[in-house]
Image (cartoon, rainbow, N blue to C red):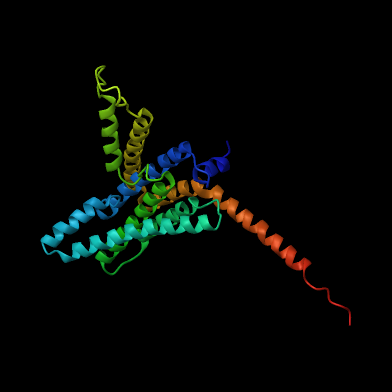
Amino acid sequence: MSLKDYSRRLTGKIRTKDANSSLAYFLTFIAGAINAGGFLAIGQYTSHMSGIVSGMADSLALWQWSIVLSGLGALMAFIAGAATTALIINWARHSYLQSEYALPILLEALMLIVFGALDGMQWYYDWLWTSVTVAVLCYIMGLQNAIMTKMSRSEFRTTHVTGMVTDIGIELGKLFYWNRSHDDPKKPPVKSDRAKLFLLSKLVCLFFLGGLIGAFGFKHLGFTFTVFLASILVLVASAPVLDDLHAAKVLLKRRRRTSQAHEPTRQPD
């Protein structure tokens, strides 16, 4: 399978369970790397909103309004990212595009470049640089989380592992449940979804691996490491976008030919 065919399978309009799982591997790795890089950059994790909302509550009780406002900005940025994904996917779907899922992934790649560019900017106030960086990271996390949520119909989350670890615990509970022979025959036996358990375990490991590589990358390469992460996303999402561009080009040529064919011929004077 060529790289273009693989990209089309991962992020194309036609979805399969295997394609969703494969894309989840990439996005979970990227999320772990971004989360680790964000921590090294600003000293806090931005992939989950639970800690941010809890921090807002604690800060409000202590009358630390600056932290409350910073947390509110991060929360709104995350929501804006998720809303952007929904807008792009629904617009592309109504426009009959093949890249309805690839477009928000390309936008995520662009925002990663923006995040990397923030390191080279000079800010008069340090708190402003921190606030903008947190907002960009939270926007990226919201954007990506909504991509996988829409694509898999809420089966996967790629930016945080709380839900995945919970599902792993549920499946382990089912796996170790003892179905006794004298149980009510009208009730189906408890069975664990081993395929789901294996998939979730791989996603958690990939998030950890992404965090490890991201920490090393940002530590030794700095913010330029975002170029490597963005390039992965571009390769993953390139084929459906190129397909739509080619289709648009063909349609434009066809319309030009049609308009030229219907133009009235000028009579000689």
Above or below for 219 versus 22: below
Q: Residue furthest bottom?
A: 269
The quarter of the rendered structure image containing the C terminus is: bottom right
Viewport quadrant of the N terminus: top right
Q: Residue furthest left?
A: 62
Residue 137 at what x, y percent from top left? 33, 55
- The front one of 123 and 71 is 71
Which of the pair 189/108 is nearer the observer?
Answer: 189
Q: Position of residue 262 (x, y in %)?
A: 77, 68
Query: In screen coordinates, is 218 left or right of 98?
Result: left
Q: Which quarter of the figure has residue 71?
A: bottom left
Q: Residue furthest right?
A: 269
**Residue extending furthest top?**
181
- Of the pair 242 and 100, the residue shown nearer to us: 100
Q: Is residue 242 left or right of residue 27?
A: right
Residue 238 place in picture, x, y as percent = 53, 49
Q: Residue at x 18, y 55 (%)?
A: 55
Name the quadrant containing residue 253: bottom right
| Residue 120 can be seen in this image | yes
Residue 115 seen by the camera: no
Report the number of discs. Answer: 0
